[in-house]
Image (tube, rainbow, N blue to C red):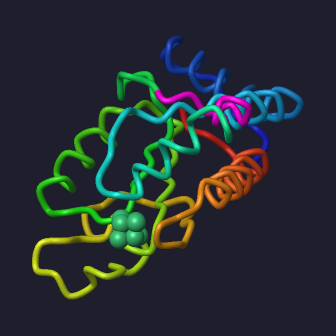
Amino acid sequence: MTDQILLTGNLKEAARKAAQWLANRKPIRDLRDWGTAFSLWPPHFTTSCCGAEFGAFAAARFDAERFGMLPFSSSRQSNILVIEGTMTRKMARAARIVYEQMPEPKYVMAIGACSLEGGIFWNSYNTVLPSEVGIPVDIYVPGCPIRPEAIARGLLMLQKKIRHQSTIKM
Ligand code: SF4
């Protein structure tokens, strides 16, 4: 019964339901997830010093584009937010706005010890964790400072997760 949908009433709503049903079925679902996993575009947004390591990951030696990750200038065309280490309350507000502007499906990668449990700023009055400001993290990558290889490893794990995700809502 869960695989059946009832196309009644409003034609536009019925078409939306049919498109959602189709997009969540194999092989279209596999194709969609494969495309999403290798088209991860983070907005240019840096919260702290781990941003320098992310810059190294994006540069020539590690070349983030080989993994399908292309830093992008607009949050409205981005689908992965990278929280780079410590996040102050002031930057957390900006991060939340950027996250809300990103279209679905969207993902969050938090890198560095500071984004996991506060790191060296664990008892600071003005730093917060992503979970405290309503930013759901899909993958945490530890380290202080984090190495570009670790970011690459985290990205590969996130891609694996995306390719095994279940369904989407349209
Ligand atoms: S984890 Fe280390 S390198 Fe990263 S933001 Fe915190 S202090 Fe800086």
Evaluate whether residue 21 shows in this view. Answer: no
| Residue under the point 49% across and 52% down | 53
Q: Nearer the viewer, residue 128 or 32?
A: 128
Residue span colored magenta: 63-71
Furthest-top residue in view?
11
x and y percentages locating residue 46 in the rendered image:
32, 46
Q: Quadrant of residue 50?
A: bottom left
x and y percentages locating residue 15 in the rendered image:
60, 15
| Left or right: 130 in relation to 12 | left
| Residue under the point 67% across and 53% down | 158
Furthest-front residue in view?
61
| Residue under the point 48% across and 42% down | 55
| Left or right: 47 in relation to 57 | left
Q: Quadrant of residue 113?
A: bottom left
Above or below 13: residue 91:
below
Furthest-right residue in view?
27
| Left or right: 127 in relation to 111 | left
Above or below 23: residue 12:
above
| Left or right: 132 in relation to 35 | left
User: Taking the image as four quarters, which one is ligand 1 found in?
Assistant: bottom left
